[in-house]
Amino acid sequence: MSSGWLDRIHSFLRPGSPSEVGWVPLSAVAELAWLLRDTLSRNVLIACDSASTLDDLYRDLLALAPESAPSALYYPAWDVLPNSGFTPQPEITGDRLNVLQR
């Protein structure tokens, strides 16, 4: 790892442990995700607190993606509550399965 701010981020992000970065703008989270992916040569998982936050972050990830970056994957939330007796929309189920296959 290089010195400076990247070392501070690396010490904050413990391998195998979840880390929260809710105190920065979503565009900064997107940029940080791409930087971490390139620097650490690992995939980065980002969980959001709402569907609208996920949509906004996904747009930022697409807009800030380096040319050589793989595509960002979008794992949509269910559109029904568990045990509600309703079936999720087939499109959402298909989208979730496609992400898990990769």
Image (cartoon, rainbow, N blue to C red):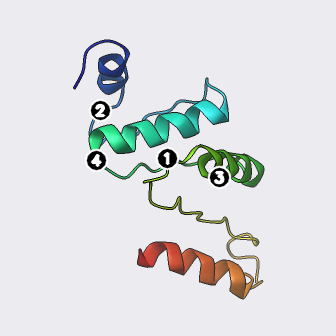
Residue, x 53% and y 30% (percent of image)? 21
Secondary structure of the residue carrying numbered label 4:
loop
Secondary structure of the residue carrying numbered label 1:
loop
> Can you tell which mark lies on residue 41?
4
**Which label's residue is closer to the chain start, 4 or 1?**
4
Residue 69 percent location from the top left of the image: 44, 54
Give the Cα distance between marks 2 and 3.
Answer: 24 Å
Residue, x 61% and y 84% (percent of image)? 94
When the figure is inspected, residue 2 is found, relative to residue 67, above or below; the finding is above
**Which label's residue is closer to the chain start, 3 or 1?**
3
Secondary structure of the residue carrying numbered label 2:
loop
CB under 8 Å between discs 4 and 1: no
Give the Cα distance between marks 4 and 2.
Answer: 15 Å
When the figure is inspected, residue 55 is found, relative to residue 77, above or below; the finding is above
| Residue hosting label 2 | 14
Secondary structure of the residue carrying numbered label 3:
helix
Q: Nearer the viewer, mark 4 or mark 1?
A: 1
Quarter holding the C terminus is: bottom left
Q: How many marks?
A: 4
Q: Amino acid at mark 2?
A: Arg
**Which label's residue is closer to the chain start, 2 or 1?**
2
Q: Nearer the viewer, mark 4 or mark 2?
A: 4
**Which label's residue is closer to the chain start, 4 or 2?**
2
